Each structure stands twice: as C-alpha cells, then as structure tokens.
Amino acid sequence: MPMAPPPDFDTLTIADIARLAEEDRLPPVERWHPAHCGDSEMRIARDGTWFHQGSPIGRAAMVRAFSRILRREADGGYVLVTPAEKLDIAVEDAPFVALEMKVEGDGRDATLAFRLNTGELVTASAAHPLRFEERADGPHPYLHVRGGLEALVARAVYYDLAERALAGDDRPPGVWSAGTFFALQA
C-alpha cells in the first residue's frame, strides 16, 4: 500500500497537525531485535539528504519509507530495522531536519509545530522537547522526534525561534510550546 503524500503544511492548523501526528502509525521498530546484518551503505547528510552508495536518494517516498524504520541504538548508533534484518546507517548530525514551523498563540499559550524533511509533523512539547547546543560555529537547535531520534532545526526556522524568544519577557530568553518552556541557552 503506497503512502499518501504529506499534506500541505501551510493549510494545516495546529489541531490538524496534532490529529495527523496521532493518526500516523509508525512500525514498532523498538520491538524488533533481529541479528545485525551489516552496513546499509546509506548515509544521512547534515542537510537531511539521504544517500545510498554515494548517490542521493531522489524519491521522497523512498526516503520517507526508510525514515519510518530508522532506530537509534543504545550505543548512539543508527540502524534501519525490520523484523528480519538490522543494517547500520551513517548519520552526520541528526537524521531529520525541521524545515518549517507553524505557531499558534503567544507566550505561555503558544504551540509550535514543525514539518520535517520527511513530511513528518511534530509539535514541540514535554514529549518532544527543543534543545539548543552551543558549538564553535554557533547554536545548533534540535527537536526530539521519537526514540532518541532528533531533527536539526533549519537555520531559517531557528532565526524565527530566536526572534520569538527575544520578543518575550522570559529570562533566560526562550520559547513556549504546549505548556513547556524551552530556553535558547544550551
């Protein structure tokens, strides 16, 4: 059964996003424990591009399908897993990229929802926290997606977050989403 294309993010309300995220049934990869079979010869670049044997995977539906069987292991590595096999996959930074943000409400009443490069929708909350890591080349914001998997927040989206944080009264500066506060400081 083919997967439907992701909905147009611009037309969705936060309530639509929450409903779609709830309806999106992911495979139970956390319950699958097959023997390790080797290397998938796949890599996820920092910009979210998926590669196989050095060539970019151009079909968005294929990337989305692979992203649904991605799992983070206890040792910090990443694997593609099915009930029958487990293959390593290289991830340069985070396996996902948060490309767009939608905001409803202000201050403590705000809700921030994100569309990932795979089409997946995630609302920042206590269950899906935002975190900010300071590095030599500047801040690196991340959104927890599921099971230890994170999305690097795209630079343009980060600037929107920073603008919201600096416009607020909170000290330290930060953003609210779904009743949870996320400080911009690492």
Image (cartoon, rainbow, N blue to C red):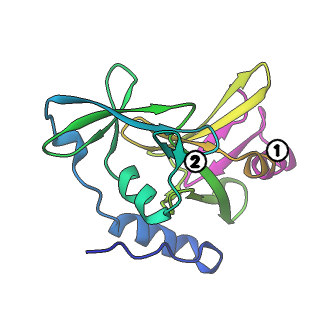
Neighbourhood count class around disc 2 (C-alpha, 10 Å): few under 14, some 14–19, many 20 upward: some
Q: Judge from the rendering whether residue 97 lies leftward or rightward of residue 90; answer left or right.
A: right
Identity, as a three-letter code, of the amino acid under mark 1? Asp
- Left or right: residue 6 versus residue 26 is right
Label count reads 2
Residue 110 in view, yes or no: no
Q: Pick whichever of labels 1 and 2 is earlier in the sequence.
A: 2
Q: Is residue 185 magenta?
A: yes
Q: Residue 145, percent across and down?
A: 46, 46
The residue furthest bottom is 11
Q: Against 169, is 122 above or below?
A: below
- For image coordinates 51% across by 49% down, the residue present is 125
Which residue does the image show at 66% across and 65% down from the upper left?
A: 102
Q: Nearer the viewer, residue 27 or 182?
A: 27
Dots 1 and 2: beta carbons under 8 Å? Answer: no
Residue 28: where, in percent of width, then height?
A: 21, 49
Q: Quadrant of the C terminus?
A: top right
- Quarter of the image where one finds residue 46: top right
- Residue 176 counted in the magenta span: yes
User: Is residue 73 in view from this perspective?
Assistant: yes
Q: Position of residue 37 (x, y in %)?
A: 21, 31
Q: Which residues are magenta?
A: 160-186
Separation of residues labelled 1 and 2 (CA atoms): 37 Å
Circle 2 residue? 49
Above or below, 160 relative to 174: below
